[in-house]
Image: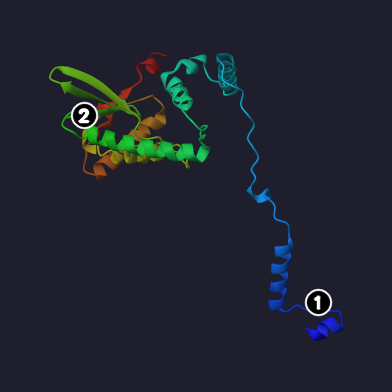
Amino acid sequence: MAWCKANKCEPKLPKYCAQLREKQAANQQKTLDPHLKELPARLPLYTDQVYHKAAIHWFVENDLPIQALEHPSFQNMIDMAARATNSVKHLTGKMTQNQIMVAFKRTLTKIRERVNSEMVQGRVSLTCDSHWIEEERPGVWKMGMALIGFNQLNNPHNGQHLGHTLYKIIERVHIQHKVGHMTCDNASNNDTMLDHFKECMHWDGHKFDRQQQHIRYMSTIFL
């Protein structure tokens, strides 16, 4: 250190450099900058006119039907948001996707339990979504419908891939043994789809007769 002072050189020893940084930090003026946050833009006070303007802007920007504003679920969402005491935490795309998947899996579990319960003792007919009939109480019948799968195909949409995908969806809700009739349009690849679906069913020990259980769209036939 004495030699560095005599020759006007700045020492580079680790201990000296650490002490120098601590001294500079102690002498630096403290500021609040790291703790300050920019205030969000202040929203206008609520009036019916302000709300109506924002709602109209929302459905125009998203090209929605006017009836969307009258939908009970939309009005329920607005009513819930109005109860917020400290603003509303808006959903992001990722948050929305995750919550939809959680809700879908929960609903799928309920559907699986329902269609395999004693309430649904007959067959489950499919239209690339599914429907069934429940006897809520003696003599009272109710049709049930649900979306049980919406799969993305990353390969050609030919009959073979469609048939295997359809079988996986049926397997997901454990109704291979209850498949009734299948309703789909008259595209040729749907015939091939059901042929491959039949093969998958037979491999798993279940029966499916395409000729007897395939119901075609009547409107397509007439046209």
Q: Residue at x 86, y 79 (%)?
A: 8
Depth check: give the residue in front, 191 or 144: 144
Query: Amino acid type of disc 1?
Result: Glu
Q: Is residue 145 left or right of residue 99?
A: left
Q: Residue at x 35, y 39 (%)?
A: 105
Q: Residues within 10 Å of mark 1 (few under 14, many from 20)?
A: few
The residue at the far bottom in this view is: 3
Query: Amino acid type of disc 2?
Result: Arg
Residue, disc 1: 10
The residue at the far left in this view is: 138
Is disc 2 placed on a helix, strand or loop? loop
Labelled pair 2, 1 in contact (Cβ < 8 Å): no
Task: Specify the quadrant of the image occupied by residue 108.
Answer: top left
Q: Position of residue 132 (x, y in %)?
A: 25, 26
Q: Position of residue 62 (x, y in %)?
A: 57, 24
- Point out which mark residue 123 bears: 2
Is disc 1 placed on a helix, strand or loop? loop
The answer to whether residue 107 is visible is: yes
Q: Residue at x 48, y 42 (%)?
A: 154
Q: Earlier in the sequence, mark 2 or mark 1?
A: 1
Quadrant into which the N terminus falls = bottom right
Q: Residues within 10 Å of mark 2 (few under 14, many from 20)?
A: some
Task: Specify the quadrant of the image occupied by residue 174.
Answer: top left
Of circles 2 and 1, which is in front?
1
Q: How is the image coloured?
A: rainbow
Q: Position of residue 80 (x, y in %)?
A: 44, 26
